[in-house]
Amino acid sequence: MTTIGIIPGDGIGPEITEAAIQVLRAAAPGLTYEYLPVGHVAAAGSGDPLPDQVMDRLRELGVVLKAPLEAPKGTGRIVKLRPDGHRVYPSINNAVRRELELYANVRPVHAVPGVGRPGAELDLMLVREVSEGIYSGIEHRIGDVAQAIKIATRPAWERIARFSFELARERGYDRVLLGHKANVLNLTDGLELEVVRTIAADYPDVELQDMMVDALGQAIVRGDVPRSVVLLDNQYGDILSDVAAAVIGSVGLGPGANYGADVAVFEACHGAAPDIAGTGKANPVGLILSGAMLLRHLGDHRAAEAVEAAVRLVLGERRALTPDLGGSATTGDVTAQVVAALDEVDEAVAVRA
């Protein structure tokens, strides 16, 4: 019996969390769930958005399904007090990743026929380095001058480069595509490019390509990026994964997983969307597909494939589309259709297995 830690999040978080758990219960009934307060809910009780006992429990469980936590504009910094000083994080979502020592954020982008822009047949695995970069939160302001420091270290980029090449081998991709701006950020992005080129030599079966990140963004919008593992730094990955998800239909379709040495946290790529909380308009697919990634992480490949196939069936046949996809279905409608579709796809998945 495996227990999954649940961070239900803010805004639409509780709604899509329940949707994802309904699908997980149908696909893998042996799992159990433990809800843990993080963010505003935790701060309301203890004053600490990241209570030590909660973070310890998440580390103990090792596998977490996390809904988005709201990060206010301009005031979302998190300060975590420690006996030896304090740590400052630019947002609560960033804080969760770094407190749990997660470093690789994987965001798959797989087009579904009949959904999204015609011709945008993207098949990508975006890998985002999330332990450093401009999102390290090292900022200063003196009067009318503000500075942000971008951090790039050789050890972190050796680790994320190896992760990306191993992922390409594991998932059958023959290319790693690095997006960067080494023509302008000669030292930081230049170091990243240097390190990735060095690591690539250990993977002669996987081609390395690199592109300026602005040209890569244009290619994603056009839908003509070759099938690749796309490696990006923290900020570039955050932006382009949302763009890529929108190209295939909606940011609400984007799943994600964060990996560290001992903990894995699964979350959709979108935000908390407080403006539609409680309206039934939230698209649960991103978190449902994150749940499929969780199942694959646990080794239940058959259940993971069934969830993914059920989502493709519901979307491809337009059985239930939320407003972001041009439909009028509710969060509950989509969830019910995906659960029902699991029975339809189960036999086909069993045959392939």
Image (spheres, rainbow, N blue to C red):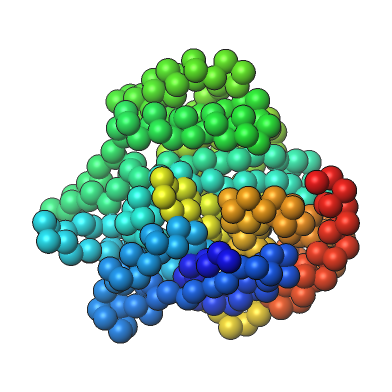
* Side of 35 relative to 298 (left or right): left
Q: Is residue 257 above or below residue 18?
A: above
Count of number-bearing discs: 0
In front here: 127 or 271? 127
In front here: 164 or 10? 164
Residue depicted at 77% across the width and 50% down the height: 112
Q: Position of residue 116 (x, y in %)?
A: 74, 52
Q: Position of residue 114 (x, y in %)?
A: 83, 53
* Side of 337 relative to 38 (left or right): right
Residue depicted at 44% across the width and 35% down the height: 160
Q: Can you tell which quarter of the image residue 62 is in? A: bottom left
Residue depicted at 25% across the width and 46% down the height: 148
> In this rendering, does residue 20 appear at all?
no
* Side of 3 relative to 316 (left or right): left
* Side of 151 relative to 208 (left or right): left
In front here: 250 or 268? 268
